[in-house]
Amino acid sequence: MTSDVRSRPSRRTAADSRHHRGTARRLAPVEPPAPGQRASRRSAARSFGVPALLLASDVGAFSAAVALTAAPTIKTLLLLLLLLALFCAGDLYRLRVSLQVLDDAASIIGRALAGGAAAMVLGGLDDGVAGIARLRTSATFGLLAVAGRAVVYAAIRIARRHHHLQQRTLLLGAGTFAGSLAADMVAHPEYGLRPVGMLDDDPLLTESQRPVPVVGRYADLTRVLLERRIDVVVVTFGSIRDPSVVDMIRACDRLRCEIYFIPRLYELHTVTRGTEVLWGTPMLRLRRAPFRSLAWSGKRVADRILAALALAFLAPVLLAVALLCRLETGCVLFRQVRTGLDGRPFTLLKFCSLRPAEESEAGTRWTIANDERLGPVGRLVRRTSLDELPQLWNVLRGDMSLVGPRPERPFFVDEFTRQFPWYPARHRVPVGLTGWAQIHGLRGNTSIADRARFDNFYIENWSMWGDIKIVLRTIGQVLKAGGR
């Protein structure tokens, strides 16, 4: 494949892309990966090889800095861990397309000095000489780290030009822009992206114009990602509407591939640190799904610890509510099948505020908030949300989380999925005892479209502090008797 720009299809203009989008047909649903499906080990090795080289280079630079400036101690090891944490926070170990040491030099030196200053303040107030020594070590490390990375970056670029350390890349879209971008990847292997195919329902490029073949339709995305061991997906312009792209990406959140997309009006896009540039074309990296991060594992551990503590602390309240429900309804716990993570059913527990007349009523009736059969105890526990407390046991078992989208009954999940295509995306994470939608009043007989939108917003923007805020606001609503 020649690299001569004149021999390639011209890049699609913004007007061309809008015209093509306007003629798009509705996208067939993308089949999500089955629970437990992951990328191959070979794909994972490609993804972690470069970060491992960078980590080894930085550890070597720190060892050399210590040898030049100070004697190794336990505090020296702590300083190394602090510096590595700062580098991780600065995304300095992420596998990137364009590797230029001058792009990273300011961040490397700045974080090295910040780590040294922090170590001097935290550990050297009682010994000024030792504190200054740590700062000197950090400054030396910053300079050596830049030099070491210059060597590693050059070695990686050379390896890529010889078709090593390449990432298998799939382009969504088979228009003129996608063809030009794929040709750039082929002509410039130093970026480390090896295009293996394109997906499109209605390709604009003829077979003779395609640098790589069209390997399927949009609905085949999950299958192609798994069968061809794709490492990187680049979303370009094609015969697909933007909302459908969102559904496709969400369906594949559990796979290991990185996702980039070409911004509309990319010619006017300002390049930032989060932007990759491939032969003059900006590519925005999609933020890694929060539930693929280490912090999410911490959330799951915290869920079970806090649920156990809450069950112990609230034992007297649980006992009193159980006794009142037993006296009014004749039963204590109400069991109901709900849909949880990845659409799997589980048995949810609640205090019995109203015994259903028949089994089918509980599964298909939307709400009983205004049911005349509710007694005073039933109304009280529902209004204060005390009927939800047994779900702490569901959290302890791992069926639920403290914070997440509220679980719904399978009957209504099927109904809402038919009405709102984005509804199933809320099942990417465990369901919760409370959630972002609930603290905004979206409970009971309120808009399902709004609930699903709020739930997906929570998933995309999850943080541990966000969960804490939701829990605190939920407690405030319970104290105000702001339940149903």
Image (tube, grey):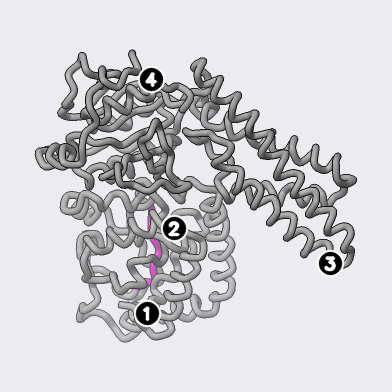
| Residue at (47% x, 33% y) in the render | 97
| Residue at (51% x, 52% y) in the render | 296
Q: Residue 52, position in %: x, y?
A: 63, 33
Q: Residue 106, position in %: x, y?
A: 60, 47
Mark 1 vs mark 2: in front: 2
**Predominant secondary structure in magenta?**
strand
- Tell me the residue that label 3 is attached to: 125
The magenta span reads 346-352
- Tell me the residue that label 4 is attached to: 186
- Cα distance in 3D space between marks 2 and 4: 37 Å
Please state which of residues 392 and 252 is positioned toward the viewer in this rendering: 252
Mark earlier in primary sequence (2, 3): 3
- SS type, badge 2: loop
Q: Residue 154, position in %: x, y?
A: 59, 26
- Cα distance in 3D space between marks 1 and 3: 56 Å
The quarter of the picture where residue 155 lies is top right
Q: Which mark is residue 381?
A: 1
Mark earlier in primary sequence (1, 2): 1
- Tell me the residue that label 2 is attached to: 462
Mark earlier in primary sequence (2, 4): 4
- SS type, badge 1: helix
Mark earlier in primary sequence (1, 4): 4
- Cα distance in 3D space between marks 3 and 4: 56 Å
Q: Callout 3: few (<14), some (14-19), or many (20+) C-alpha neighbours within 10 Å?
A: few
